[in-house]
Image: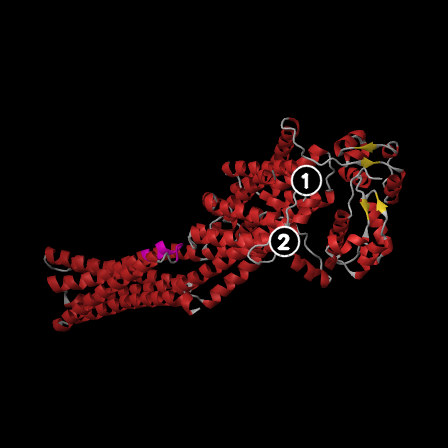
Amino acid sequence: MISLFLLSGLFLGWSLGANDAANVIGTAVGTRMLRFRTAALIVSLFVILGAVISGAGASGTLGRLGAVDALAGSFTVALAAAVTVTWMTRARLPVSVSQAIVGAIVGWNLFTGVPTDFNVLGRILATWVFCPVLAALLAVLLFLPARALLERLRIHLLELDATTRALLILAAAFGAYSLGANNIANVMGVFVSASAMPNLTLWGLPSLDSTRQLFLLGALAIAVGVFTYSRRTIGTVGARLTRLTPMTALIVVVAQSLVLFLFASEGLERWLVTRGLPTLPLVPVSSSHAVVGAIIGIGLAKGARGVNMRVLGRIAQGWVATPVAAALLSWAALFFMQNVFELRVVTPQRYEVTPAVLEHLASRGVVIPEVEALSGSTFTSAASFRRALPATGVFRREPRMFAVMNAAEVHVTRIDSLWLPARLDTSRFGAGALAAIKRLHGESFRHRWQLNEALAAQSEAWRPATGWGHQALNKELNRMREDVQRTFAEPADSP
Amino acid sequence: MDILFRRTRHLERQIDEYLDLVVQGGLVFKQGMRYYLAGRYDEFEERLARLDRIESKADELRRGVENELYTHTLIPESRGDVLGLLESSDKVLNQAAFNLKEYSIERPAIPESLRPLFLELVDAAIAAQEAMVLAVRAYFRNPAAVRDHVTKTLFNETESDRAGERFRREVFAMDLELSHKAQMRHFALRVDSVADLAEDVCDRLAIAVIKRSL
């Protein structure tokens, strides 16, 4: 059954390969510096390596935007995104797989009534603006010194050609690795919460956990997309936007790869955190956005004459249309899945409005009479809870809704410290954090926030950080919390 | 690095050798013309034979370079431009060789009084050719310098036009047979066409160098 549902993820992977690989090698193949087969081979290999080795960084963010928790739901979300991408590609609109999948997940949230975390959505939307701007900036920062250097060095045209070719191969490999690391979350991210496979060990290599197996499958699908279709999409963006020389083609690939890498690297994030520097959110960004940004950056550095404004306008239209189309399509497809095929697209979730919940909300400054009126009620799905809340006044604002629904969500945990070594990867926790869990032995919690508060009361290690670099530290804290919640989870109807 | 550049360096040398031959061709033409006007026909014929050898060697080199550029798909973006430059500069050399041969065949009698003017025409045409070769060389290594050499070429081409026109006016003002006048005009235009062809190369270069700029 899992393999059937995964098909749509593989379809999405294929469309990512067909579409985004063109961004990595398009300029190199378009300027005829690399043969398509050589380029495709390099890209396929490094996409797989990037996805399996460094793919985990960006996938957490998508999970937090909407934890699509039923396989049929994941299937439909990925399918909606894949259809949107394929459709836009055929319509010759430059398209971003990241935008399609984010749109489709929001469509799932809308359909199921699960509240959207506007913090995460806001961060993702901000990267859609920030990513091309950063790519443009990097491209300019690479272009100006490169031009000055080349004028000074007076390299022979033929030597320049050979050097550029070698560098393009390296850049394509780096770009593909970054693409795999950053964008595998787009392809397989929605399946992470919904599927669990046993660990797999191949030929004595380090064993692959469920997530990495998914990523490997997705990366193989991307590779197939690269070989079967990307040839047709190569050069559509780059060539139409402005004329590129081999050297500027190289700069475009490097700038784009750097951007993808920056938004996917957990290593870089840790490095920045330990030095007290601000970090970038690890979000799947679009290689299409980055490429367009880099090309425009070079165009501007050259004096903006060469940039085709009409093509740019069309690209901008595509950027608005993609997430909207994917969200609508996802919503409609989920409706069909649930009502026509009677498949479960969301795992039922209990919500309880108890005095404890109201008190918790009040302590966070959320006091709403309409919610207090519901005190004592329980709901069996996000949609029914949402219907009970009036869609007026403060509830029109999704962040409020998100806070209320998160507080009321039932997630029963019972701490049994005997399971600690067997079920939890204790190497990720410090001594203080582990001691706190042990001290809570035997206690039960009905809501996630109750467990979080109890842990925070026990140890400094469980309290959210503030100040420089707190975002990355809190991300790690969230991961630890999720681990504990998963490990000690019990069915919702137990006392 | 050596592996990366082995083929490239070989090709670079071939292109440089080819351009050396184009320059040498111009110098041999100039010498040949001086010997012809001085009536030193043996030395003139020796120059003609040498120019023929230079020309065929240059053809051979040019074909080799073109072949290698295509078979190894080198400089895909600029290949068309480079081939165009090599072929059109070859035409300049061919024109010089062809001219010298015509002198050998027709042996036109250039009046004594017009010889300094004729030499002026030859010098200007060959100066244009030399500046053109510098421009082509700069295209490969230092595109920023192409403009200077192109300007020099165009200046010499204008000088050669001017000298050619003066020569023809003076020929037709002289008391000579019309057939003789017509032959003089033909030979003056022939020499001038070396500079014209060098100008064509520079026109190509002006475009190619824009495409090469980052």
Task: Write the residue at 38% across / 67% down.
Answer: B6
Q: Of helix, strand and loop, which one carries label 2?
A: loop
Relative to residue A33, is residue A76 drawn left or right?
right
* Residue under the image location 38 percent in, 58 percent down: B74
What range of the chain is rendered magenta?
B75-84
Q: Point out which mark residue A209 bears.
A: none
In this view, A62 is above or below B108: above
Left or right of A79 on screen, residue A473:
right
In the picture provided, is B21 more to the left or to the right than A109? Answer: left
Q: Quadrant of the C terminus of chain A?
A: top right
Q: Amino acid at mark 2?
A: Ala
Question: Is residue B172 among the parts visible in the rendering?
Answer: yes
Colour scheme of this structure image?
A: secondary structure
Q: Give the vertical position of A161 relative to A231 (above or below).
A: below
Indicate which disc residue A68 carries: 1
Q: Any magenta on residue A466?
A: no
Magenta segment's dominant SS is helix
Residue A204 image point, x, y percent: 57, 58
Q: Quadrant of residue B186?
A: bottom left
* Residue of label 2: A264
